[in-house]
Amino acid sequence: MFTLFENAQIIDPDRDAPFAGCVLTRGDVIAEVSQGPLAAPEGTDRVDCAGHFLAPGIVDIGVKIGEPGERHKESFRTAGAAAAAGGVTTVITRADTTPPVDTPEALEFVIRRAAETMDVRLHPMAALTKARAGKEMTEIGFLADAGAVAFSDGDAVCTNTKVLSRALTYARSLDALVIAHPQEQGLSAGAAATSGKFATLKGLAGVSPLAERMGLERDIALVELTGASYHADQITTAAALPVLRRARDNGLDVTAGTSIHHLTLNALDVGEYRTFFKVKPPLRDEDDRRAIVDALSEGVIDIISSMHTPQDEESKRLPFEEAASGAVGLETLLPAALRLYHAGGVSLNILFRAMSLRPAQRLGLPGGQMQAGAPADLILFDAHAPFVLDRFTLRSKSKNTPFDGQRLQGKVRGTWVGGENVFTA
Amino acid sequence: MTFRARHLLGIEPLHPVEITTLLDLADSYVDLNRGSAKHSDALAGLTQINMFFENSTRTQASFELAGKRLGADVMNMAMQASSIKKGETLIDTALTLNAMHPDLLVVRHPHSGAVDLLAQKVNCAVLNAGDGRHEHPTQALLDALTIRRAKGRLHRLNIAICGDIAHSRVARSNILLLHKMENRIRLVGPPTLVPSAFGELGCEVYGDMREGIEGCDVVMMLRLQKERMDGGFIPSEREYYHRFGLDAEKLSFAKDDAIVMHPGPMNRGVEIDGVIADDINRSVIQEQVEMGVAVRMAAMDLLARNLRGEGA
């Protein structure tokens, strides 16, 4: 019933720095967080944290699972195991499956399969438009009732402004959050890289980084028009940041995320056409990467996601422009994010604000907090443990990680979801 | 003699000394090709497979002739007609060929980086005969040999590359090679066909043909690749010819002894006036074709030596 986490460095995202203390959980909620020792009731289980960090579990918005349609790339079971091992206690799934999650029936399938096979929590997103085709809106009301936490067509941009404006208006009447992929499709169609020196040398079709700002400008204008709640899935360029700031200053309900890959890698990492580094939007220049890291520290970027996108070997072992986009990230999100901490720029509390607290708040979920009454979704990790990643040790069915063979620091020692231990290293 | 590369995938990894070594050897093959017994046994017993995933007449013929003159067994595979249509992946195709134990694999592919990918999977030496808009190293080498023979040197020259640079692998390989050999490169064309990133790569970019070729030693024209355009890069062919087509009037801005080059096939009346192309005092276009065979002989010879472990 009771579990006492002792001797921990506690990360409370509402505070500015970790502190030594202990956490008592009762059943599936946190009962007490204390800086000093805690008197635990008789029969309490004890977990010695050995001085490691104890943080609220990660809430990962935008995870692609291969079900339905591509179970050979990832199943709910393998994604659940990967999430638990990666410290992700809540998975927010994307709707860009085959077929897409655009009906209450499909949504029900996702929720049922997840409940049967996963130890971590799962909340699905639903498509904003039918078949993600950008022509007609989905049954936003039914889908919200069935448990959709947000509405998104993934990386399919709704180019018909009228359709998007109506969907935003309708979503607003239900207080539903719309998540979009800001990108001017007229510029980005066919591109496999960010335009610039590298793409030019390698002969890859490039997209200007300004295509992101243009997409965001349009979306923000529509938010101004409709009053909808809007989240940009990935902001990856410096040029888009002033647009974001202006929207906030004007009091619009706008937030922004970014992917862990755009925070830790740049366009040059593609090197000799390494397709595991092909993501959407494409990796950016180092100047852009640094601007996004700074924006994260300032709170202009709210949320970090893994943008977990499993792809099998066949879809990646192709010429770069033909290869599929995306990288797996559930298990590497935390150690990759810790690169920002070890490099000295970003504090652990900022990281967990962006990985746990803000995503939960944005979706109206109770997680992400280190407070009495919050769900006992906790992760214990050693921020310093070094290792070299071998992609074949990943629990995901697909092994398409750009971090293969790289030195990383930070290992999850244990994961608890609703007070239940779901992973121990 | 120094040439250490295992494959010839691009100009980018080559050292200037390797380039000079290859050109020196190619010079000797020019002499061989001009003689009456055009045969050597440098590649005797070796198998050369030409794998073209994209249409080519000139380059494929040049590679085939080069291999045959050096005594290799040459096989041509037109890949568009073959397994690609049946859904076989590039890597499966490579592994299939690998099992036939070729020694030299000449590959052209419509996607940038595809030849690099293939080279990782096979045991033989791979020559890039053009991948997407990335590189076309033997074209740059034959251009270099042509320039060196016409100008007596391959450094400190003013070279203008004109036309559709954005879509051109020939331009990329030439820029890399001519930079390595310390030349001054100007890129001339409408801004839609000459991306500004080339400016960051150490080239001077001109939007005016006369200014661009003024005082140049070499004027290299590129084919306007109509088939690559997905629309709207230039208003019309006739406006393009008026502003960027090479005719006698524009050529008069270059040095009096400037040479005119074109990788072929030419669109006469689009990027170049037929009279200029045929002017034997200025145009070295036919010589380029001749140098192509010699350069490809030299490249395959050097790679075959490395294959046998005889390389220096």
Image: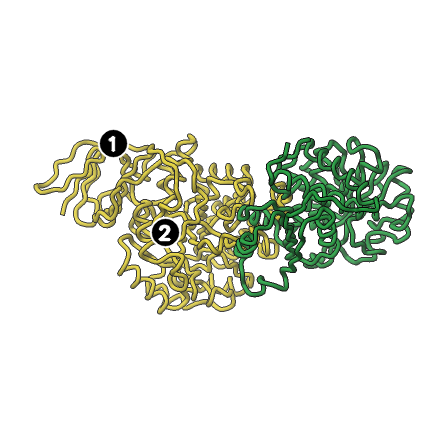
Chain colours: A yellow, B green
Instruction: Measure how far apart labels 2 and 1 are at the Cα level.
Output: 29 Å
Foreground label between 2 and 1 = 2
Q: Earlier in the sequence, mark 2 or mark 1?
A: 1
Query: Looking at this view, is B81 or A368 the one in front?
Result: B81
Q: Is residue B115 left or right of residue B29?
A: left
Q: Chain of mark 1?
A: A
Instruction: Note whether residue B225 is visible.
Output: yes
* Amino acid type of the residue that numbered disc 2 sits on in the rendered structure: Ser
Question: Who is closer to the viewer here, B267 or A97?
Answer: B267
Where does the C terminus of chain A fall, quadrant-wise?
Answer: top left
**Nearest to the observer: residue B86 or residue A312:** B86
Residue type highlighted by circle 1: Gly
Residue underneath mark 2? A396
Few, some or many C-alpha atoms within 10 Å of disc 1 (few <14, some 14-19, many ≥20)? some
Residue B257 x/y as whole percent:
90, 38
Estimate the x, y position of residue B120 in percent, counting from the top left: 54, 46
The tag on residue A51 is 1
